[in-house]
Image (cartoon, helix red, strand yellow):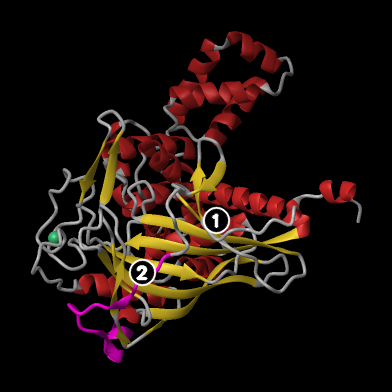
């Protein structure tokens, strides 16, 4: 192949991207991994500390049982084997925000191994799977706060000792989009199982990506680099792509890729090598002498398995099977566990799942997005929305009136039948009342009425609209239509 044609083809046609992920997730415990300090986000610097997490001499760690429970739940939800014996190890390195000079982690004998996550579907309908190499428990380090103006660095140890799980995937992803899909599915699973609040903004979910490139057709993996410093899933995707393109350009010139840590620079949209010497780490791992091995009884592990709620994928399949919902609808409705629970509450109490799905995907999601809240903090309870849908089904209120009632429910949390009665939105079947509104509408729109009678049929909509407005949405549009046609013909 000539140089000209090679240059004309994108790197993806010549090279294959290989990506593995390392995700650190903060466990949703009230207290830290090895002491009783609170884990509240945003506490004043160094407020949540004690001799253990400050690493004062003689202080000893005591393992937080709830952290173990959550880590095991995460591992089981990721279909890992949870080992009856795992061992804490010291990961030794020097860093100003690491007061002990080591992190308590797990190394040779991690909590769990050999899991799997389905991240999507192939065009042929098969599962796209990503292997989970291991899940282990570790503690977080503190935080260095660089003050540009003071020209100083301060240390905040509130995060020191906060419990994490590290989830390491196999290098099974072949594109930035697959890595993004894997993270979204992973986040959803961790949110459904209530293991973590999975907030990237608050640092409770952090992602490092291992990226390499190899010539298409090669079986051997290329040299990988580790990409860090991404603060959103879309940043992860862009960083992976930028690093892949950088590696391909090196390989094109027969330059070796150096195993190193690359930092994503979101402002410039590029990756550059970290100044810290990395990749040559020797953490001198050894078993933590202050903690015994972690022993988990088989029946305790089975109880944790029983705690795992129905996961998003199983829910989507059930929605398709039981409610006849399409793939897209099921996807939207299971985006979060709170939303899925909300939808099911409405569907169960109203009976018509399709109508419930339409309302939740339309009005409810719109209101939640506007308020910036999750479904479990929504003022309108599922039972009340179900009641509103019953009123529409039974012809008590029109769809137009129902939307207005819903808006009031969002604001006040009042019950729909109260609002309908108070605001005069109950459908009026009283023929005299409807006839009076029709007369008023005709009187208020003499020009439209004349043109409608002269044959401009499309003006009927304007007149019906005027009657509906006069009636506050409580007239039956079909009846109004019929009346207007009758009047015009008379
Ligand atoms: Zn502490």
Cα separation, mark 2 vs mark 1, equals 30 Å
Distance from mark 1 CB to nearest ligand 1 atom below 8 Å? no
What residue would you read off at disc 2? 283
Which label was assigned to residue 377?
none
* Residue at the image position 20 percent from the left and 52 percent from the top: 157
Residue 47 visible here: yes
Cβ of mark 2 under 8 Å from ligand 1: the answer is: no
Q: Is residue 165 magenta?
A: no
Q: Residues within 10 Å of mark 1 (few under 14, many from 20)?
A: many
Judged from the image, the secondary structure of the residue bearing numbered disc 2 is loop
Which x, y percent locates residue 420?
33, 37
Write the residue at 75% across / 54% down: 252
Could you say which is closer to the camera, residue 340 or residue 204? 204
* Residue 330 visible to the viewer: no
Looking at the image, residue 251 sits to the left or right of residue 192; the answer is right
- The N terminus lies in quadrant: bottom right
Quarter where residue 269 is shown: top right
Label 2 Cα neighbours within 10 Å, binned few <14 / some 14-19 / many ≥20:
few
Residue beneath the point at 27% across and 66% down: 103
Q: Tag 1, which secondary structure?
A: helix
Which residue, given by chain and number where applicable, does mark 1 sit on? Answer: 180
For the residue pair 287 and 170, the one nearer the viewer reads as: 287
Depth order, front residue of 275/197: 275
Where is residue 359? Give x, y as percent: 47, 47
Furthest residue toward bottom: 298
With 182 as the anchor, is 430 left or right in this view? left
Q: Which residues are magenta?
A: 281-303
Residue 366, percent from left and from top: 45, 40
Residue depth check, mark 2 versus mark 1: number of the one nearer the observer: 2
């Amino acid at each position: 192949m000539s140089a000209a044609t090679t240059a004309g083809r994108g790197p993806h046609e010549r090279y294959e991207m290989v990506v593995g992920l390392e995700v650190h997730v903060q466990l949703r415990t009230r207290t830290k991994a090895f002491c009783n300090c609170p884990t509240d986000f945003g506490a004043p610097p160094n407020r949540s500390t004690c001799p253990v997490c400050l690493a004062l001499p003689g202080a000893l760690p005591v393992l937080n049982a709830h952290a173990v429970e959550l880590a095991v739940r995460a591992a089981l939800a990721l279909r890992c084997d949870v080992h009856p014996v795992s061992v804490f190890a010291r990961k030794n390195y020097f860093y100003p925000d690491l007061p002990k000079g080591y992190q308590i982690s797990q190394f040779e004998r991690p909590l769990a191994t050999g899991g799997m996550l389905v991240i999507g579907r192939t065009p042929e309908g098969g599962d796209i799977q990503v292997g989970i190499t291991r899940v282990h428990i570790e503690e977080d380090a503190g935080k260095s706060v660089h003050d540009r103006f003071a020209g100083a660095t301060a240390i905040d140890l509130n995060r020191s000792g906060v419990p994490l799980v590290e989830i390491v995937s196999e290098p099974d992803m072949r594109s930035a989009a697959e890595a993004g899909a894997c993270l979204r599915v992973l986040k959803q699973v961790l949110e459904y199982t209530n293991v973590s609040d999975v907030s990237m903004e608050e640092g409770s979910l952090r992602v490092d990506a291992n990226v390499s490139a190899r010539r298409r057709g090669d079986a051997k993996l290329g040299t990988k680099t580790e990409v860090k410093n991404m603060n959103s899933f879309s940043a992860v995707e862009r960083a992976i792509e930028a690093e892949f393109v950088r590696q391909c350009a090196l390989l094109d010139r027969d330059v070796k890729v150096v195993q190193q840590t690359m930092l994503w620079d979101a402002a410039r949209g590029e990756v550059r090598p970290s100044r810290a010497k990395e990749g040559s780490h020797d953490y001198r791992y050894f078993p933590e002498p202050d903690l015994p091995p972690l022993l988990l009884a088989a029946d305790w592990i089975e109880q944790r398995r029983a705690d795992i709620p129905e996961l998003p994928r199983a829910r989507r399949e059930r929605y398709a099977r039981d409610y006849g919902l399409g793939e897209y609808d099921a996807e939207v409705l299971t985006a979060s566990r709170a939303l899925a629970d909300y939808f099911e509450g409405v569907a169960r109490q109203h009976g018509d799942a399709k109508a419930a799905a339409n309302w939740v995907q339309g009005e409810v999601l719109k209101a939640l997005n506007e308020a910036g809240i999750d479904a479990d903090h929504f003022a309108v309870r599922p039972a009340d929305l179900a009641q509103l849908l019953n009123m529409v089904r039974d012809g008590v209120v029109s769809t137009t009136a129902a939307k207005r009632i819903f808006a009031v429910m969002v604001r006040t949390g009042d019950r729909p039948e109260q609002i309908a009665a108070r605001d005069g939105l109950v459908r009026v079947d009283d023929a005299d009342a409807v006839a009076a509104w029709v007369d008023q509408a005709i009187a208020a729109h003499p020009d439209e009425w004349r043109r409608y009678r002269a044959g401009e049929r499309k003006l009927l909509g304007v007149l019906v609209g005027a009657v509906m407005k006069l009636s506050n949405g409580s007239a039956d549009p079909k009846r109004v239509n019929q009346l207007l046609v009758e009047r015009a013909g008379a």
